[in-house]
């Protein structure tokens, strides 16, 4: 028979076991020391400073010829010749069309003969009037005969004037059979061919000549923007720009090689669009600009003397679309400033209101901060402080 030993239940053994259990449980349930406070996030800032900045506006527009001449016949007849190359350049005074001149040449010859006859009659009337003037003094002819001779002289002078006018008219009509270019420029396609019948002052054109060097660009600007600009100039907030230069941006985004100059602004507002037309003039020596092209133009319409430049990345918008920036205030807390923008200068916004000189505008680290949070600011482009960088690199102890 196997004998099993009896388990001891001595009070000392029980006490030791309980004490050991308490020590083990205390070791397992001991709380770890809380981690040190996390340092405030580091943000990069720029210090707002005022400076003189041109207020550049970018406006849409279209090119339009400097001058346009629509060719129409001033006499009726058959087109005999077309003397130009379609799409080419023509000079002022260059002959473009020849209209059949036979009828007008005959009319000119007839008028010329009529003038010669009137001049001959005038010479005869003048001699007779002089003869009667001498005879009436010695009473060789009656006073009535002398008066008739003087009247005949004046009538002959009038006939000469009428004949000369008829000759001028015939000469003008004969010249109109040769259609000349009224201006220099580029001519389009011909709308008539040799053999076509044309009539004087017809509504249809023969061709169109356009002067493209220089060339105009008609820009549109809202009347509200123009009124605000004029109001700020009157208040002295901005200064007026003189001899405003204009830079042209083509449809493909490239800049036109030649700068232009603002010529004038329209004196009335388009009731359909509420906009005002500004016209700028550009040199076009190579013919790169053609009429009807859509372009954009940058022009400095004023000079802001107290503007603040802020990088594009620093400007955000609230739910209502208002522009705003985040700044670090005197207590090293993040605050919001609603700002007014007036265009761009390179890669920066031009701020004309809502931001004070000397304020620290956050340009990097915007995603990791919120309004009212403590932050540590460093000037944009400088290295972060070593102690802060080291603390930020420490691992969290859980």
Image: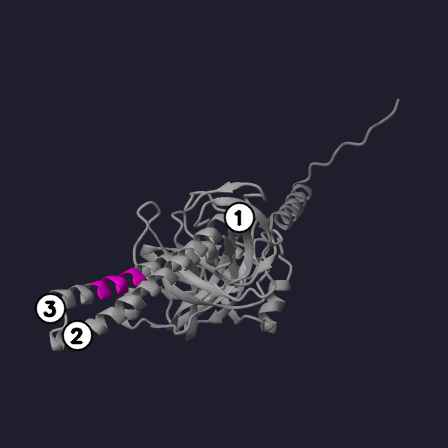
Residue 303: percent from the left, percent from the top? 39, 72
Question: Is 17 one of the magenta-colored residues?
Answer: no
Q: Count residues near mark 3 (Cα–Cα under 10 Å), then give few for <14, some for 14-19, many for 20+.
A: some
Q: Residue furthest top?
A: 1
Q: Is residue 25 above or below residue 36?
A: above
Question: Is 153 one of the magenta-colored residues?
Answer: yes
Q: Which sits earlier in the primary sequence, circle 3 or circle 2?
A: 2
Q: CA distance from mark 3 to mark 1?
A: 55 Å
Residue 205: percent from the left, percent from the top? 48, 46
Q: CA distance from mark 3 to mark 2?
A: 10 Å
Front residue (pair 152, 396): 152
The residue that appears at 38% across and 48% down in the rendered structure is: 320
Residue 170 at least partly seen:
yes
Query: What element does badge 3 sit on?
Result: helix
Front residue (pair 281, 304): 281
Query: What element does badge 2 sit on?
Result: helix
> Would residue 151 appear left or right of 167 to someone viewing this image?
left
Q: CA distance from mark 1 to mark 2?
A: 55 Å
Residue under numbered circle 1:
100
The colour scheme of the drawn protein is one colour
Q: Which mark is residue 135?
A: 2
Q: Which residues are magenta?
A: 152-161
Residue under numbered circle 3:
143
> Would residue 39 appear left or right of 267 to someone viewing this image?
right
> Would residue 188 appear left or right of 239 to someone viewing this image?
right
């Amino acid at each position: 028979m196997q004998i099993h030993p009896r388990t001891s239940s001595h009070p000392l053994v029980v006490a030791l076991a309980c004490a050991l259990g308490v020590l083990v449980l205390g070791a397992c349930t001991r709380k770890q020391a809380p981690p040190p406070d996390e340092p405030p996030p580091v943000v990069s800032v720029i210090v707002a400073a005022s400076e003189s900045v041109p207020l550049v506006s970018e406006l849409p527009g279209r090119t339009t010829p400097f001058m346009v001449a629509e060719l129409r016949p001033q006499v009726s007849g058959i087109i005999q010749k077309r003397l130009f190359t379609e799409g080419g350049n023509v000079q002022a005074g260059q002959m473009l069309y020849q209209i059949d001149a036979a009828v007008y040449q005959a009319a000119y010859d007839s008028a010329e003969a009529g003038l010669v006859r009137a001049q001959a009659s005038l010479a005869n009337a003048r001699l007779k009037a002089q003869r009667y003037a001498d005879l009436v003094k010695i009473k060789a002819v009656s006073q009535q005969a002398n008066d008739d001779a003087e009247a005949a002289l004046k009538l002959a002078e009038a006939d000469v004037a009428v004949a000369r006018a008829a000759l001028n008219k015939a000469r003008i009509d004969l010249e109109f059979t040769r259609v000349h270019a009224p201006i220099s420029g580029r001519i389009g396609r011909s709308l008539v061919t040799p053999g076509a019948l044309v009539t004087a002052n017809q509504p249809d054109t023969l061709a169109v000549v356009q002067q493209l060097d220089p060339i105009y660009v008609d820009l549109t600007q809202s009347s509200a923007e123009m009124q605000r600009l004029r109001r700020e100039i009157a208040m002295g907030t901005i200064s007026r720009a003189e001899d405003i230069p204009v830079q042209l941006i083509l449809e493909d985004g490239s800049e036109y090689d030649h700068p232009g100059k603002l010529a004038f602004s329209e004196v009335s507002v388009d009731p359909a669009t509420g906009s005002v037309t500004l016209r700028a003039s550009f040199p076009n020596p190579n013919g790169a600009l053609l009429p009807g092209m859509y372009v954009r133009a940058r022009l400095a319409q004023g000079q802001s003397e107290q503007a603040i430049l802020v990088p594009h990345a620093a400007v955000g918008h609230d739910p209502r679309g208002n522009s705003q920036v985040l700044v670090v205030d005197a207590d090293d807390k993040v605050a919001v400033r609603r700002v007014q923008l007036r265009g761009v200068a390179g890669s920066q916004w031009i701020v004309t209101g809502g931001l004070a000189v000397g304020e620290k505008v956050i340009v990097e680290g915007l995603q990791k901060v919120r309004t009212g949070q403590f932050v540590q600011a460093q000037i944009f482009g400088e290295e972060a402080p070593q102690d802060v960088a080291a603390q930020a690199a420490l691992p969290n102890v859980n």
